[in-house]
Image (cartoon, rainbow, N blue to C red):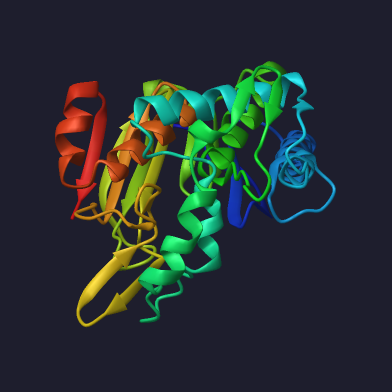
Amino acid sequence: MSPPLSVYQFQAMGSPCEILFEGISKAEVDRLGALAEAEARRIEHKFSRYRHDNIIFEINHSHGKPLALDEESSRLFDFADQLYRLSEGRFDITSGVLRRVWNFDGSDRIASPEAVTALLPLIGWEKVQWQPPVLNLPEGMEVDLGGIGKEYAVDAVFGVLATLTPVPLLVNFGGDLRCRGPRSGGEAWHIGIENPDAEGDALQMLSLKDGGVATSGDARRFLLKDGVRYGHILNPKTGWPVSGAPRSVTVAAGTCTEAGMLSTLAMLAGPDAESFLEAQQVRHQVLR
């Protein structure tokens, strides 16, 4: 039987965050946890769209002038470009402007077609000039890395910790996670797949010794009008919620970033989510 786990907890990126360690002292947990928290906050500070003192703010207020990005930012924009191409334009980091008319707060306030249509000219990664490391964003457009930032942070924090301690560990940011094992005695980590209709209630358990897990879904961000549920995953081509999207998609892969990429692309595939994931040959759970 594996020894008890020690936990370091904090709040970041709008999510409860926890680091689980096996077989180390409280002092070491506190030391390593503080380093993990610092890395998470560094990434949040650098890439959050809510700040006025970071690279995202600088890009979004560049007024059509080219900007040379640092190496880390360039890697993330390269990844966003890859996702745009893989999804045939359905994953688009310029679509964040749609938040001006959509607020998925559980109410029945559906955006008007006129308001959505008015924003469509400001959306389209193909309009952005990206010649790494130089980005040229047209005037009036915005970028938002929220669709990939948390999974990137999980892997970055995991990478920091993995170089500092050999013990089994798990990094969990609001259900998106990365783990290393196996635990003592060969035991796997046991991860609950949450019921989208009951927060904190696990429908199934997923066993994983090494790798990442990510979940995309509408459990907490949706609208409900006339019996129709509108999830927060938007089609950037239309400005409207993806039709036929699952309630949630959970994917296990080699890293949290890879799992997040696949779960998001599956949600964007709508009714074809299952066939998309089966073609990727990854462990997954789709709930409708």
* In the image: residue 77, left or right of residue 253: right
Q: Which residue is drawn at 80% across and 36% down?
A: 31
Residue in the image at 58% along x and 32% along y: 128
The quarter of the image holding the N terminus is: top left
Residue 24 x %, y %: 67, 31
Q: In which quarter of the image is the C terminus?
A: bottom left
The answer to whether residue 22 is visible is: no
3 and 279: which is toward the camera: 279
Residue 276: which quarter of the image?
A: top left
**Residue 154 relative to residue 207: left or right:** right
Compared with 116, 190 (above or below) is: above
One can see residue 224 in this view = yes
Q: Is residue 11 above or below residue 107?
A: above
The x, y position of residue 69, in whole percent, is 76, 25
Q: Nearer the viewer, residue 268 or 19?
A: 268
Residue at x 70% of width, y 41% of height: 47
Q: In this view, does 66 lie above or below 13?
A: above
Question: Would residue 276 appear left or right of 253 to someone viewing this image?
Answer: left
Specify the farthest residue to the right: 53
Relative image position of residue 83 (x, y in whole percent)? 43, 29
250 or 119, nearer to the observer: 119
Please tell me whether residue 116 is drawn above or below residue 144 in the rendered image: below
How many numbered dots are placed on residues in this image?
0
- Residue at screen point 79% across, 42% down: 58
- Point out residue 259 in the picture as x, y percentages from the top left corner: 40, 31
> Is residue 115 rendered to the left or right of residue 187?
right
